[in-house]
Image (tube, rainbow, N blue to C red):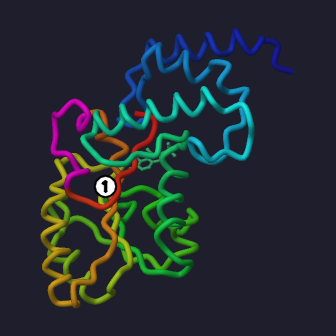
Amino acid sequence: MIKESYEEIIELERQRQNHNVELIASENFPSKRVLDAAGSILTNKYAEGYSGKRYYGGCEFIDIIETKAIEDACTLFNCNYANVQPHCGSSANQAVYKALLKHGDTVMGMDLGAGGHLTHGHKMSFSGQDYNIISYGVDNNGIIDLDDFTKKLYENNPKMIIVGASSYSRTINYKDFRDIIEEYAKKHNGEKPYYMVDMAHVAGLIAARCTSNSYSICRCCNLNNT
Ligand SMILES: Cc1ncc(COP(=O)(O)O)c(C=O)c1O
């Protein structure tokens, strides 16, 4: 039997976090303001649907909060639309698959072994089980192999391309991918795959304008608890 109370165990975890260097970029530390909001009475409320279109009554303040968060996200990331509903990165990625694809469609994503994420097509995840995944990777120097990516793009005509990584030490040039996709589209009657950037690890840097903004370049972007 575990004797400690929940509060005591949370305190132990707080101390662990304070005394260790966490090196996973997406496993970051929310501000107190975010922690307060996430653990507030807002958790008591059902709010399925979207602002103004809910399945439950009593959502008037939830609607205001969600609308405000959308406005702030659009300002922060300089984009036109945002979905701020609480997802982890994996379920947010799943939402994109569900919104844009049919079961069995072909998707290109970065191989887990090259630095990609499980949800970019690994067999252990829904992505590798429900979709036809073509993985691209890195060359011998550990740099994303754009020639191999281009070859696979033309060979497989994917419905969606995922760019972004869990473990890649270089800056990803989102525009390189877009240029390749635009070139491909010219040869395919203008048809092009959806271009999705999973920016889980760099969202904070993008928000702080420290690295290029994938929103201005791709069709949709996902981030997690950054
Ligand atoms: C690139 C990328 N996408 C998605 C995820 C999944 O995020 P979550 O752990 O919030 O489901 C991660 C996790 O680190 C990630 O690195």
Q: In this figure, which residue is indicated by the disc labeled 1? A: 164
Q: Residue at x 53, y 10 (%)?
A: 15
Residue 212 within the magenta-colored segment of the rendering: yes
Label 1 near ligand 1 (CB < 8 Å): yes
Q: Residue at x 66, y 33 (%)?
A: 59
User: Does 73 sit left or right of 168 as displayed?
Assistant: right
Position of residue 210 relative to residue 140, above or below, is above
Residue 73 point in image, percent of width and height: 36, 36
Residue 184 point in image, percent of width and height: 18, 82
User: Does 41 sit left or right of 31 as displayed?
Assistant: right
Nearest the camera: 226 or 22? Answer: 226
Q: In the current view of this chain or complex, which residue is farthest to the right?
A: 1
Q: Residue at x 53, y 77 (%)?
A: 102
Q: Residue at x 20, y 74 (%)?
A: 181
Residue 220 within the magenta-colored segment of the rendering: no
Q: Quadrant of residue 183?
A: bottom left
**Residue 139 shows up from this direction:** no
**Callout 1, which amino acid?**
Gly
**Which quadrant would the C terminus be assigned to in this image?**
top left
Residue 168 point in image, percent of width and height: 26, 50
**Which quadrant would the N terminus be assigned to in this image?**
top right
Q: For the residue labelled by badge 1, is the local secondary structure a helix, a strand or a loop?
A: loop
Q: Which residue range is magenta in the image? A: 205-216
User: Does 35 sit left or right of 78 as displayed?
Assistant: right
Nearest the camera: 118 or 100? Answer: 100
Residue 164 point in image, percent of width and height: 31, 55
Position of residue 111 relative to residue 25, above or below, is below
**Residue 40 shows up from this direction:** yes
Sort mark 1 into few (<14), some (14-19) or many (20+) by Cα contacts within 10 Å: many
Position of residue 134 relative to residue 121, above or below, is below
